[in-house]
Image: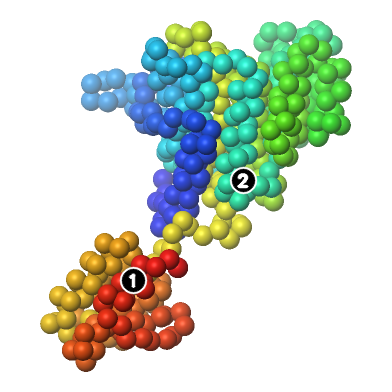
Amino acid sequence: MRDIEPEEYGLLARVREAFEETCRLFAFQLMEPSPVELLSTLEAKSGPAIREEIYHFKDKSGRDLGLRFDLTVGLTRYVASKRGLPLPYRVAAFGGMWRYDEPQHGRYRWFHQWDAEIFGSGAVEADAEVVEFTTSFLDRLGLGDYRVEVGDRRVVEGYLRRELGLEGEVAMEVMRALDKVGKKGVKAVIQEYVGKGFSRQVLEKAVELGRIRGPPEQILGEVERLGGEEAAGLVELVDSLKARGVRGVEVNLGLVRGLDYYTSIVFEVFYRPDPQLGAIAGGGRYDLLPQIFGRPDLKATGVAGGVERTLLALKAQGVRPSGALGPKAYICYIREGLRGPAARLASRLRARGVSVELELSVRRLEKQLRSAAAKGARYAVIVAPEEWSTGRVVLRDLERGEEERLEPEELVSRLSAKG
Ligand code: AMP
């Protein structure tokens, strides 16, 4: 697993701030579910096959445990276990995930997700709220050039049943094939599934359905024609997103996402300038998971986003970490006897909210100033014998190369002023 270095840490803090502010605006309660779960809890979402993809182990008491691979499982377990929460309950979390993935560009074994969920509402308005949460968060970060693909597996299921007579496990397999078209391409997917014994004709018709994508105003008519009653949810979602002014919405019937889990509306968000990134967020409705935790009464919808992929998008835009990396002032002193006044000055500045690095040992001034520049300080404050004897210190603006002599009081109010 990699280390999160200072520059990335600063950007991560920026993403987290924007996320928490969006949670406040949309009235989501923030919490953090446990990083370690019973293996059986982690298997609830995707079955025992998940073992291949996660970190799991026996603890000293022989219990089978695993590190969380997303936040949805922990949040659902938590909300399901709390009777008496005011429903619908809006809850959100931000934290580290562990997956036994093969590390590559934008794919890590330890990464961060942000996550927002609404439990206890089956209304399409809840799905729309979650989508708008996502775009509002991205707008806040300055990543406004996105495409929001929306789909609904009920439309696909209805079509497969009526037009192709497919149901049950066969229909599921064909939907899995459809889900792969985006990544692998039509030809490869048809070849793979013909190899598995599926009819080429059926696959070709199913894949055709996946080609139905585009701006809602252009294709919603066709979706309604093909999807019949099952299209009602998707139409309602698109209407609500329009009323909310959500931009970049496209319908994509080929989008079905993690089939064992989502039950109807699904969506994925892509950052247009960098399609290589893959989805930067994705979500949908998963009404069955709360049932596994004993709460069939709780319906659920939510979204999760990859923080590191968001960071890559921010970096590509030249966005800097939140707050400067270097101190505002570096305090130098020239003689042992001036250490005390220099330290006092540092304390006063810090008490007024100024970021200060204090020189730790007496060195040649030139070396101290070199350190100040290397650390990215905006100013050097020099406590030197001659000036100090008249009650002043030197303030050097390292960007402009200008110097002034100021009394400590003046220096403190100057540096604590904004900018
Ligand atoms: P998922 O829970 O698989 O739907 O993933 C949600 C989001 O997490 C994705 O849209 C990605 O942005 C991000 N993500 C998933 N796996 C990784 C990984 N191994 N490394 C970094 N980001 C990831």
Q: Amino acid at mark 2?
A: Asp
| Percent position of residue 90, x then y | 49, 25
Please tell me in which quadrant of the rendered image residue 195 appears: top right
Return the x and y of residue 367 as percentages of the image width and height. Answer: 30, 83
Image quarter hosting the N terminus: top left
Q: Of 169 and 275, which appears nearest the observer?
A: 275
**Considering depth in this image, is 192 or 106 the residue closer to the camera?**
106
How packed mark 2 is, by other alpha carbons closer than 10 Å (few <14, some 14-19, many 20 or more), is some
Q: Tell me if the residue at label 1 has its CB under 8 Å from ligand 1.
A: no
Would you say 80 lies left or right of 200 here? Answer: left
Say which quarter of the image contains residue 31.
top left
Alpha carbon of mark 1 to alpha carbon of mark 2: how far? 36 Å
Q: Is residue 256 above or below residue 277?
A: above
Kindly identify the residue that appears in the image at 82 percent across and 8 percent down.
162
Side of 232 relative to 52 (left or right): right
Q: Quadrant of the C terminus?
A: bottom left
Badge count: 2
Please tell me which residue is depicted at 63% across the width and 31% down the height of the picture.
131
Along the polypeptide, which appears first: circle 1 or circle 2?
A: 2
Is 361 above or below relative to 83? Answer: below
Image height of 93 relative to 176, above or below: below
Q: Which of 183/403 is in front?
A: 403
Residue pointed to by mark 1: 413
Quarter of image, res 254: top right
Is label 2 in a helix, a strand or a loop? helix
Instruction: Residue lying at the far left in this picture: please name it.
Output: 337
Residue that mark 2 sits on: 139
Helix, strand or loop at label 1? It is helix
User: From the viewer's perspective, is 70 left or right of 154?
Assistant: left
What amino acid type should be assigned to the residue bearing mark 1? Answer: Ser
Q: Which residue is found at the position 44% from the left and 24% from the top?
A: 75
Q: Does residue 328 appear to the left or right of 297 in the view shown?
A: left
